[in-house]
Image: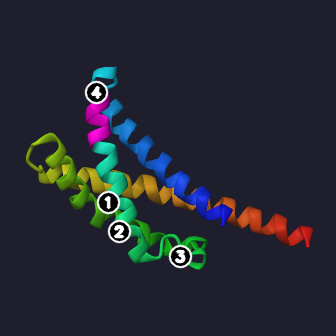
Amino acid sequence: MKSKKLLVLGDVFAIADLTIIGFVIHGETEASYLSRMAAAYFPVLIAWFLITPWFGLFEELVITNPKNLWRVVVAVLLAAPFAAVLRSALLNTSVPPLFVLILGGSNALGMMLWRWIYILIAQRIKKIKTRQL
């Protein structure tokens, strides 16, 4: 159960990091951009947590197997358009297709990296527990 908390917390921070990186890349780092960061962050977070359960991305047997990292990519690519629509509703703007592609691609890479790190952590914890028995 503790590993699932770590996974959820890691997802929340990974999405935050990816959002911040996106704004840094665009040179938008002043405090005046915080509301726009929130308008990008929360829709992605909501979309991620609505889509991922459908791919078993919180089930122990799925999340600890590196062969299942493809599920992360598919989940992000499905969550990105939904997140972009939520974001556009918050900002009262249109949904640029290029934004959806970049959001999906960059978040897919970032979340896959985080989930791979999680797998390594989970494997290490499992080895330590096995040695203690």
From which residue to which does the magenta span run? 34-39
Label 3 – label 4 distance at C-alpha = 38 Å
Q: State which quarter of the image contains the C terminus.
A: bottom right
For the residue pair 21 and 34, the one nearer the viewer reads as: 34
* SS majority, magenta: helix
- So how many labels did they put on this image? 4
Tell me if label 1 and label 2 are in contact, CB under 8 Å: yes
Q: Given the current orientation, which residue lies at the most extreme bottom position?
A: 61
**Considering only order in the chain, which callout, 3 or 2, is on the residue closer to the N terminus?**
2
**Considering only order in the chain, which callout, 1 or 3, is on the residue closer to the N terminus?**
1
Percent of width and height locating residue 22:
33, 38
Q: Amino acid at mark 2?
A: Ile
Identify the element where label 2 is drawn.
Answer: helix
Circle nearer the viewer, 3 or 4? 4
Q: Which mark is residue 109?
A: none
Q: In this image, 70 relative to 96: left or right?
A: right
Percent of width and height locating residue 83:
25, 55
Q: Disc 2 marks which residue?
A: 51
Circle nearer the viewer, 3 or 1? 1
**Considering only order in the chain, which callout, 1 or 4, is on the residue closer to the N terminus?**
4
Residue at point 80% right, 68% down? 127
Residue at point 57% right, 59% down? 7
Q: Amino acid at mark 1?
A: Ala
